[in-house]
Each structure stands twice: as structure tokens, then as C-alpha cells.
Amino acid sequence: QVQLVESGGGLVQAGGSLRLSCAASGRTVSSVMGWFRQAPGKEREFVARITWSDSSTYYADSVKGRFTISRDNAKNTVYLQMNSLKPEDTATYYCAAGSTITTSRQLYIYWGQGTQVTVSS
């Protein structure tokens, strides 16, 4: 069992920055960590993912160039640095762990409880 705890969300003005953290504990058998987000009335969507082994990353087009995912293996923690935030980035952000390197949320096994990010215009 893997437990994931997100932190770092909050309220920020457009153009600002936030850094989200996701601390993993328990039996860490995952190969990949992902960040997803869900806005009210919308489906949960992929944001970014990173592999534990070689830090291979992949981003959704909507965040490419603005968000950076990284990991600290020693701390079992994954980060999402979010710069140049836009009102449309407002959502609950979730981290997830899986064994398949993918952007598909259905293939991620473990999920955190989510952290709210609100970007004001």
C-alpha cells in the first residue's frame, strides 16, 4: 500500500507561482508518479508525470513550458513547480502513483487526497 499526501496549494494571482509537493510513504512499488487536476464540472485530466528511475518527464500541452515536475528519491517526494499561472489552471491537483508509464489516469493505482489551487485574474 502506498500513501500519497499533497501539499502546497493555495490562492495566487495570475502570473504567480506555486510549488506542490507529494510525499509518498508505504511500500513504494510504483515506477511513475503523475500529477492530475480536476476543475469543477470537468473530468480529471493529466498534467505531468515523472519516472522514479531516470526522471523521464512528460507534460500536457496546456502546461508545457510553465510547469516543471521533479522528484527527490531520498525523500520519496515529487514536486510540481507551477509558474505563470492562469485562471484556467484553477483546480484540485492530485498526485498519483502507478507501475505503468502513462498519461492515462485509469492506470494509476494510488491517489492522494488532492490540494486546491485557485488562480485569480
Image: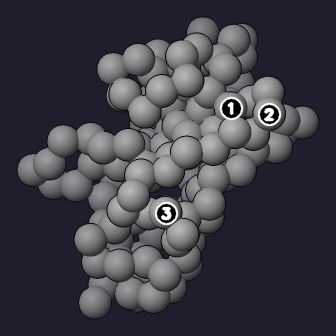
User: Residue 91: x, y in percent?
Assistant: 31, 59
User: Residue 42: x, y in percent?
Assistant: 14, 48
Residue on which the image places disc 3: 64
Q: Amino acid at mark 2?
A: Asp
In contact (CB < 8 Å): disc 2 and disc 1? yes
Indicate the quadrant containing the N terminus: top left, top right, bottom left or bottom right. top right
Q: Amino acid at mark 1?
A: Thr
Residue 77 visible in the displayed image: no
Indicate the quadrant containing the C terminus: top left, top right, bottom left or bottom right. bottom left
Q: Amino acid at mark 3?
A: Lys
The residues tagged by marks 3 and 2 sit, at their Cα atoms, a distance apart of 20 Å
State the SS at label 3: loop
Residue on which the image places disc 2: 54
Is residue 15 left or right of 80 when viewed as pictured? left
Q: Residues within 10 Å of mark 1 (few under 14, many from 20)?
A: many
User: What residue sits 36% from the left and 62% below the top?
Assistant: 62
Residue on which the image places disc 1: 51
State the SS at label 2: loop
Q: Residues within 10 Å of mark 3 (few under 14, many from 20)?
A: few
Location of residue 23 (image quadrant)? top right
